[in-house]
Image (cartoon, helix red, strand yellow):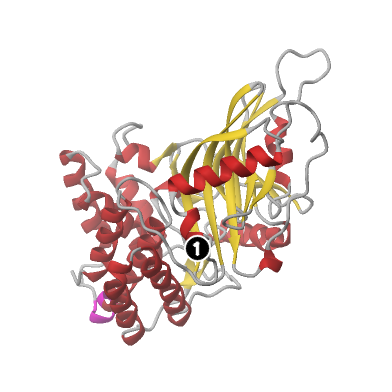
Amino acid sequence: MAEQFIHDPAMPGLAIAMHPALFEDALATAMRDASAGKWTISSVERVRFRYRVGRRAVIQLRVVVTGPSGARRCEAAAWLHADPRQRRDPSMPEAQTHDEAHPLELVEPVTGARLALLPRDHRLPGLRHWLAKGDELPAGADAPTSSTELVRYRPGISASLRVTRADGEQCFVKLVPPAELTDHAQRWRRFADGIRDREMRVPPLLRADPGDGSMTLACADGHDLSAWLAGKGRAVPDDTIRIGLLEIAGIARRGLRLEREQTAHAMVAQAHQAAELISAVHPGMAARTRELVSSLRDSAPTFDSVPCHGDMKPDHLLFGEGCIWLLDVDQSCRCDRLLDLVMLETRVRDGLRLGAYRPDRARRLSAWLDDAMRSDSDRPPSKHTMQRRRWLRSWSALMLARHHAQTFSPDWEARLGNALALGECDD
């Protein structure tokens, strides 16, 4: 992978933070100094990158911390802020003088980054509590009452956990900043109510705790669509998927009320932010990205306004018995009825063009997508429908490109270029 070093005048330390070897050395030195030589960081692996030009950057890491008792592998997040007043200096944990303790938060002086080793995240105060639950032993018991698995972590934004009790029952827990919990929970309930009695379902929201920003959800029994596409899961009839996608396309025609409406103007603003990020991370793709944003601004269509999932991708679909479960509906909104279908199509076609599927599976997926994107009537799609579809595909491709620019997978540059190519296609 060709390394990209971002030079942001507002955050001069970002260029060093983006350099793997320099950043690893800086963090190891800071950890050694903070623990008086007892602990050091022996390995740093970058996982995800979130960047707002001229404002802040968050780098999600997997680190190996080595000390007197050996090595510990843990997740971490490095925060950089343009405004020093936004940086929250670490508060040291209680048992800091214990021989086995190591600093859970520290400030690296060279880059100015605040490194937070999980389970400490000042915007997700409940994360430490939930991860510690799996280590609690009741009196007289030889096994914990539950085990907690961190499924997904977005520093300062959200965390998804799977909790398995001793009796085998499971639930999902999603953590968000406590101030945002009420809005997330209300949006989840509204969306669940709007798709009631359909083949599409949302895992029931069991409880919402404003104290630690946690939402506890019933576990949907099913299989991840991405695993099925890779040929690793249970075979699901193509008709089931096609019918499910057509349901997504017109998901609540009876009129669900959602407060947040995604207009074409707001989506152009999102595309502009994505272009800034892509241009900063990969300057060679700046011209193509800005051209896509210009085309969106100049050709914004008139939208329908129906409830949409708002973040449709294979990872957010689970197939159960006789139904399809939708996960992570906190981005649900009112928008064009084609939004979810086009977002899912763009992401699957991204995998098709990169050869992520076996040839026989790729042929079936291509035919299935062509069928799902057709109108459900015998008449061909109108010129306005085709315009909306092209516009939404370009916007979805930019959102996909932004995601690839925020990751450090070995082929992220190829994926970034492929996503932009999907947005440039007219057919």
Residue 297 placed where, x, y %?
A: 36, 84
Prevailing secondary structure of the magenta residues: helix
Residue 27 shows up from this direction: yes
Which part of the image, by quadrant, shows the C terminus? bottom left
Of 56 and 31, the residue lying toward us: 31
Dot 1 alpha-carbon crowd within 10 angstroms: few under 14, some 14 to 19, many 20 or more? some
Question: Which residue occupies 29% across, 55% down?
Answer: 413
- Residue 318's image quarter? top left
182, above or below 275, in the image? above
Residue 35 placed where, x, y %?
A: 71, 36
Of 149 and 406, the residue lying toward us: 406
Question: Which residue occupies 31% across, 85% down?
Answer: 299
83, above or below 158, in the image? below
- The stretch in magenta equals 382-386
Q: Can residue 90 be found in the magenta stretch? A: no
Residue 172 placed where, x, y %?
A: 60, 40
Under mark 1, the amino acid is: Tyr
- Residue 230's image quarter? top left
Of 150 and 90, the residue lying toward us: 90
How many badges with numbers are in the image?
A: 1
Of 392 and 277, the residue lying toward us: 277
Residue 78 placed where, x, y %?
A: 58, 51
Residue 328 shows up from this direction: no
420, above or below 407, in the image? below
Residue that label 1 marks:
51
Question: Which residue occupies 25% across, 59% down?
Answer: 418
Q: Secondary structure at mark 1?
A: strand
- Residue 295's image quarter? bottom left
Q: From the viewer's perspective, is 98 left or right of 199?
A: right
312, above or below 96, in the image? below
